[in-house]
């Protein structure tokens, strides 16, 4: 089945800086979903990308789906302490399969 | 709307015992999926139920089973517990279109510890 690889596994960011996390697949994806899990919490749906080259923004978060629909990225600008957590991408292949996640910590 | 409700929140069991976890989905959601989350393996798909039928199953041994009732509530059961079954078990509900375009809404999970 489809598998998505996420890099980096950990991201330590200075408050106010930008960072990007990536989600890659060796096969073409029908869509990609992104979730965020706060420490001690449960995954919460952020966004879904469906079209080739699609870009969606949610305040300081920018999500992009690659032209070949084999990769996706999440870019966060001006990181805040509220951005702490693990960000997962997920792809659908008869089931929703999650990447290993990028765990983000923020230095104030 | 009320969110996905999972009970119990915490559970401690001994090896060899069995356990049943419960999940009440968001009203109107007909699909319920179960995931196991561990630090080493991440989020692993267990199974999905839709309209009381198991629609998909992950790569877990037969000790893991589930069911869904007519009101869409779901239960999962793990028999003959092993230490490695210690994990956070997450239930997620969705509209369940079967096209993979319905977001999952997760419950708070049941933290199972096997001693």
Image (cartoon, rainbow, N blue to C red):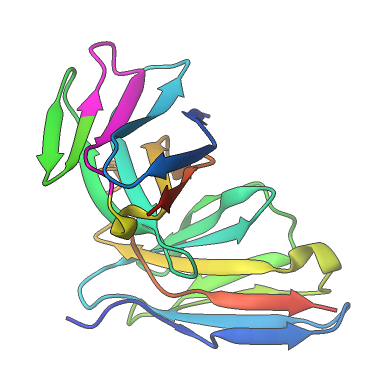
Q: Which residue is rendered at x = 22% and y = 78% of the image?
A: B27
- Looking at the picture, how far across and down is residue B65, in whole percent? 64, 67
**In the image: residue A52, left or right of residue B8:** left
- Looking at the picture, how far across and down is residue A56, in whole percent? 12, 35
Q: Which of B27 and B14 is in front in this view?
A: B14
Q: In which quarter of the image is residue A51?
A: top left
Q: Quadrant of residue B6?
A: bottom left
Assign the N terminus of chain B to one quadrant of the image: bottom left
Q: Which residue is rendered at x = 35% and y = 80% of the image?
A: B70
Q: Can residue B75 be seen in this view?
A: yes
Q: Which residue is rendered at x = 39% and y = 55% of the image?
A: A84
Q: In this view, does B111 lie above or below A60?
A: below
Q: Is residue B23 above or below residue A94?
A: below
Q: Quadrant of residue A43?
A: bottom left
In the image, residue A20 lies in the stretch drawn in magenta = no
Assign the C terminus of chain B to one quadrant of the image: bottom right
Q: How many marks?
A: 0
Q: Which residue is rendered at x = 23% and y = 12% of the image?
A: A67
Q: Is residue B3 above or below residue A61?
A: below
In the image, residue A66 lies in the stretch drawn in magenta = yes
Tell me where the magenta segment starts and ends, as one range: A64-79
Residue furthest top as drawn? A68
- Looking at the picture, how far across and down is residue B91, in whole percent? 46, 68
């Amino acid at each position: 089945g489809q598998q998505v690889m996420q890099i980096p596994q950990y991201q330590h960011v200075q408050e106010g800086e930008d960072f990007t996390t990536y989600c890659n697949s060796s096969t073409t994806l029908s869509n990609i979903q992104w979730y965020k899990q706060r420490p001690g919490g449960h995954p919460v749906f952020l966004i879904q990308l469906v079209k080739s080259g699609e870009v969606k923004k949610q305040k300081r978060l920018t999500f992009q789906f690659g032209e070949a629909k084999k990769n996706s990225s999440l870019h966060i600008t001006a990181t805040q302490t509220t951005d702490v957590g693990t960000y997962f991408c997920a792809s659908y292949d008869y089931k929703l399969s999650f990447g290993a996640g990028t765990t983000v910590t923020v230095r104030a | 709307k009320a969110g996905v409700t999972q009970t119990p929140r915490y559970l401690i069991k001994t090896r060899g015992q069995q356990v049943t976890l419960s999940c009440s989905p968001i009203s109107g959601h007909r699909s319920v999926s179960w995931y196991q989350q561990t630090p080493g393996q991440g989020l692993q798909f267990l199974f999905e139920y839709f309209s009381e039928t198991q629609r998909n199953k992950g790569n877990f041994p037969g000790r893991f089973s589930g069911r869904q009732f007519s009101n869409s509530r779901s239960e999962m059961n793990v028999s003959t517990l092993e230490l490695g079954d210690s994990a956070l078990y997450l239930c997620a509900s969705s509209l369940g279109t079967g096209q993979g375009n319905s977001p999952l809404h997760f419950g708070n999970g049941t933290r199972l510890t096997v001693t």
